[in-house]
Amino acid sequence: GQCSQVCPVGAITERNEVIEVLRQLDSKRKILVCSTAPAIRVALAEEFNADPDFNFTGKMVAGLRKLGFDYIFDTNFSADLTIMEEGTELINRLNNGGKFPMFTSCCPGWINMVEKSYPELRENLSTCKSPQQMIGAVIKSYFAKKLGVSTEDIIHVSVMPCTAKKGEAKRPEFVQKGKDGKNYPDIDYVLTTRELLTLMKLKKVNPAELADDKFDSPLGISSSAGNLFGVTGGVMEAAVRTAQIITGVENPIPLGELKAVRGLEGIKAATVPLKTKEGKDINVRAAVVSGGANIQKFLEKIKNKEVEFDFVEMMMCPGGCINGGGQPKSADPKIVTKKMQRMYTMDEQATLRLSHENEEIKQIYKEFLIEPNGHLSHELLHTHYNDRSKAIQDMSLHEKK
Ligand code: SF4
């Protein structure tokens, strides 16, 4: 995945961010908020040798609380929010026209690839920010408002399986205005899973020994569909669950039965029945691709019109975020399969398995966002993409001189 591209400087950046976060935790001058991606809990479960069907989420939250965070929120909540926004966007494109295939936009490795190498596909990308950036934006607006504080009073640390997420958090458009009129980043620091483990070691926190704890409200409840974002095919599976219900399909695919998008194969495809606003039955041609080489192969096929799709999930790391460049290194050749199985077990054990049934999702729309793809959603949860291919060409010209 991204790892090989960033490793030369990775060690230095890693140490700095851990030290910075340590300083924030020790000084306690600001309100410290942490959010965690789906892939973190399964990585920690493996790291601390938890039983395959043991859900480590409560221990992870307890560990973060012990580190000194004031509020701990779940990036899975914003994965559910992504499903609301991206599902609505897909349905709108199907009803009103737009660029197809529509590509998911939650993986910054993939976004970088489009901006640098396939800028002509920018309009095919969903305009949705990634779950990391969505929760960043709502913490520093909706949640800050609830606390009665300003954007700059909060420090938000995002824990990710991914080194490309550090670059994503630094994009200049992902900011909120403080009361002094200056821009403040939605995410202040991004720690990888490895860095979180370093932080826990430095502060002598062993989550496995702690009693289970719960995420804070109002950005802590999530469906197991949101959790599936951590694995290849998971965004598709979560989106299909909600889109089929919202559009009123008579016989939606039963939960857990969209098997064609599961597993470690690099390119997977499925046909998904949806309904148009006129009540016409349509078949959405869905594809799921993971791994940089598979993405290139797939895009060639699209370009040559060998295949045609309506909605495609793209992840740079083979297997998805569970196999991200920021995850702990493992000598176990089955580690990705094991993490994947944990994700599906968590889904089977969960009582809340649909993003649109999440009470905190309903609450944020009722109190704040009003409706998916509405005015405030566009301002806070959607984004645009740049053509960076020219900058890359200029750089290589420069190098040749
Ligand atoms: Fe990061 Fe996940 Fe994309 Fe890998 S697949 S680059 S871990 S977002």
Image (cartoon, rainbow, N blue to C red):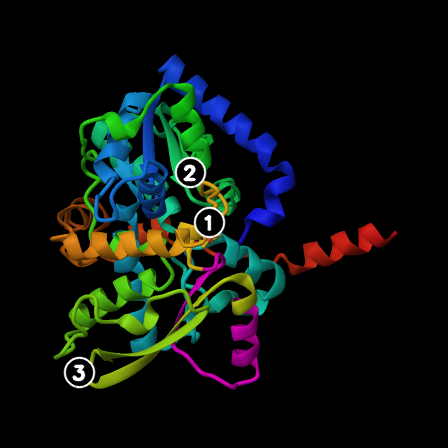
* Residue, disc 1: 324
Residue kind at label 2, given as amino acid type: Thr
Q: Which residue is mark 3?
A: 279
Q: Is the CB atom of the residue marked by disc 1 within 8 angstroms of ligand 1's nearest atom?
A: yes
Looking at the rendering, the stretch of residues picked out in magenta corresponds to 295-318
Indicate the secondary structure of the residue bearing disc 2.
helix
**Looking at the picture, how far across and down is residue 27, in whole percent?**
39, 13
Q: What x and y, as percent, mark residue 229?
A: 33, 55
Question: Observer-nearest residue: 344 or 124?
Answer: 344
Left or right placement of residue 357 versus residue 387 in this view: left
Report if the CB atoms under discs 1 and 2 are less than 8 Å apart: yes
Q: Position of residue 46 (x, y in %)?
A: 34, 42
Circle 2 Cα neighbour tier, 10 Å, few/some/many (<14 / 14–19 / ≥20):
many
Dot 2 beta carbon under 8 Å from ligand 1:
no
Q: Observer-nearest residue: 29 or 251?
A: 251
Q: Would you place residue 254 above or below residue 149 in this image?
A: below
